[in-house]
Image: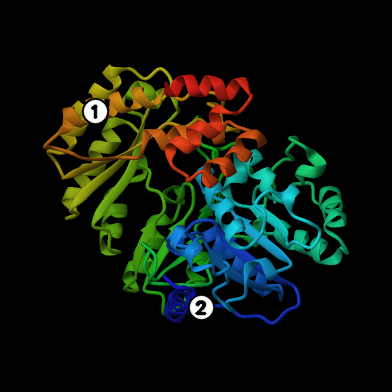
């Protein structure tokens, strides 16, 4: 595809957007998402920063990882922003939002496509200031550190504006780094802090909720208006970064405020939060929106919160599939992880979905948890088979990856072969009765190495991407690391 075609594609997407913002300002920021447009525009955090930067009088223009990186590179076009088609490398500040570990490959790609050396140490004083943040910072942003001049830890609703005040107020990049480290307690400046990451920031409750600026048909969410109904979680799941101990747990956005922020012409509404179904007024909110003729989507449904009224409201608001999670394959594992879900909750969810005419139930699970055994998988086979007698059932399976800042931090990866064997056992057991989709055991291992890694693992991302980005390229890049941690992980793969 030629450079002209890439620009035409961006213009077509822009024409279909509702709510695109344009602000004239000397303080311009390229807001870059290291995954394709469809993913980036489904990120409420990314959209919220975009909206609030404009609200503060700054120019923020969006850029994304191309859908086909190789084809974009072959066109020799620089990565450009959607709003003005200005090259990303021409902006004084490039702000990256990184959600999870595997997006670090996208970080390398978007910086390279912008004509910038990916490693911060290779960029000179004239290069843009690269400021990073996003959900990854709640867990372990050390692998991101080699690529960023500074990283905003935690909730950046307030600190992103403070950081830009500092950056635009300083004469040089080095001066800005020192000032950020000195003036913003949650700003991680690798050149100053080394590996000593500061605590994550907590946004003042008065600034909640986050809500989107733009609706677009070019995402899986299709023209959905996104906003928070709550932030954080009051539960204690052992594997989760967003548990009760993170930033004070769950913070509720009042129902009246949620409803007041929804545009009159928004026909589809996405309510976002780590535990949105735990909102005390969630059934009232969904019923109100359904009464207004709107479709509603929730980012999370906890099975123990489902009752007849709630599921009826969801059906009226457009739900055709009831999606929830129990995570552990057996009750023993769910108890170990302090999940509140019990078999009776899942059985009740299936019965309610069937009673209200839903077509399918989808259940998210994990395999490869610490101390998991074949009999745990067999328990899931038996239980899923029984559930499928009530309603068509799909299982979405992800290998367990231990994350920093959780009680299971440091737990080993089960091993690619172990995960594959467990998945094969599960597939054999439910074949013909339950639909099963699983994410890659190999890529879960890559995620694990990065989730538990440091700056050395982060640098290995560049080596893997530049070698081609295939799994063997990642395996070789990690094999060259000197750390014992990396060697232990590689033995798991073997």
Q: Residue at x 84, y 57 (%)?
A: 176
Q: Quadrant of residue 34?
A: bottom right
Q: Nearer the viewer, residue 358 or 260?
A: 358
Screen quadrant of the C terminus: top left
Q: Residues within 10 Å of mark 2 (few under 14, many from 20)?
A: few
Looking at the rendered structure, which numbered label has been put on residue 424?
1
Q: CA distance from mark 1 to mark 2?
A: 46 Å
Q: Nearer the viewer, residue 129 or 271?
A: 129
Screen quadrant of the N terminus: bottom left
Looking at the rendered structure, which numbered label has been put on residue 169?
none
Q: Residue at x 57, y 72 (%)?
A: 81
Callout 1 secondary element: helix
Q: Quadrant of residue 203?
A: bottom right
Q: Is residue 179 left or right of residue 283?
A: right
Q: Quadrant of residue 318?
A: bottom left
Any part of residue 286 in sight: yes
Q: Is residue 442 left or right of residue 123?
A: left
Residue 228 horizontal/vertical position (percent):
51, 59
Residues tagged 1 and 2 counted as in contact (Cβ below 8 A): no
Any part of residue 209 in sight: no
Residue 426 horizontal/vertical position (percent):
23, 28
Q: Nearer the viewer, mark 1 or mark 2?
A: 1
Q: Is residue 479 left or right of residue 53?
A: left
Q: Is residue 224 left or right of residue 233?
A: left
Looking at the rendered structure, which numbered label has been put on residue 19?
2
């Amino acid at each position: 595809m030629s450079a002209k075609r890439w620009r035409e594609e961006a213009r077509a997407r822009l024409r279909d957007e509702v709510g695109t913002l344009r602000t004239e300002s000397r303080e311009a920021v390229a807001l870059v998402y290291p995954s394709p447009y469809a993913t980036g525009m489904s990120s409420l955090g990314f959209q919220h920063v975009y909206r609030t930067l404009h609200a503060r009088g700054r120019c923020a223009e969006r850029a994304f990882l191309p859908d086909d990186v190789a084809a974009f590179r072959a066109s020799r076009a620089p990565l450009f922003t959607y709003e003005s088609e200005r090259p990303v490398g021409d902006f004084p500040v490039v702000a990256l939002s990184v959600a999870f570990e595997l997006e670090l490959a996208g970080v390398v790609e978007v910086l390279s496509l912008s004509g910038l050396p990916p490693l911060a140490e290779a960029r000179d004083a004239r290069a843009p200031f690269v400021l990073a943040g996003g959900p990854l910072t709640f867990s372990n942003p050390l692998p991101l550190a080699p690529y960023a001049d500074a990283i905003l830890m935690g909730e950046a609703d307030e600190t992103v504006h403070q950081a830009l005040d500092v950056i635009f107020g300083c004469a040089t990049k080095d001066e800005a780094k020192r000032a950020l480290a000195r003036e913003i307690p949650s700003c991680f400046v690798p050149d100053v802090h080394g590996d000593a990451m500061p605590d994550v920031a907590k946004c003042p409750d008065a600034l909640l909720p986050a809500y989107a600026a733009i609706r677009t048909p070019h995402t899986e969410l299709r023209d959905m208006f996104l906003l928070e109904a709550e932030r954080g979680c009051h539960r204690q799941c052992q594997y989760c970064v967003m548990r009760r101990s993170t930033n004070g747990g769950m913070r509720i956005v009042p129902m009246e405020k949620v409803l007041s922020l929804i545009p009159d012409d928004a026909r589809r509404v996405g309510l976002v939060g780590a535990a949105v179904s735990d909102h005390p007024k969630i059934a009232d909110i969904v019923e109100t929106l359904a009464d207004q003729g709107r479709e509603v989507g929730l980012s999370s449904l906890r099975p123990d919160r489902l009752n007849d009224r709630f599921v009826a409201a969801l059906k009226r608001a457009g739900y055709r599939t009831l999606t929830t999670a129990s995570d552990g394959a057996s009750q023993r594992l769910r108890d170990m992880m302090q999940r509140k879900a019990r078999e009776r909750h899942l059985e009740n969810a299936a019965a309610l979905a069937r009673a209200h005419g839903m077509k399918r139930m989808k259940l998210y699970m994990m395999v490869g948890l610490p101390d998991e055994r074949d009999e745990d998988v067999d328990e899931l086979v038996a239980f899923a088979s029984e559930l499928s007698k009530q309603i068509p059932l799909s299982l979405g399976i992800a290998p367990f990856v231990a994350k920093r800042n959780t009680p299971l931090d440091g737990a080993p990866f089960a091993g690619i072969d172990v995960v594959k064997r467990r998945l094969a056992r599960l597939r054999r057991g439910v074949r013909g009765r339950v639909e099963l989709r699983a994410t890659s055991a190999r890529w879960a291992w890559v995620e694990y190495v990065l989730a538990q890694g440091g700056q050395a693992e982060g640098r290995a991302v560049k080596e893997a991407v530049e070698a081609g980005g295939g799994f063997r390229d990642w395996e070789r890049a990690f094999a060259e690391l000197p750390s014992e941690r990396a060697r232990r992980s590689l033995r798991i793969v073997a």
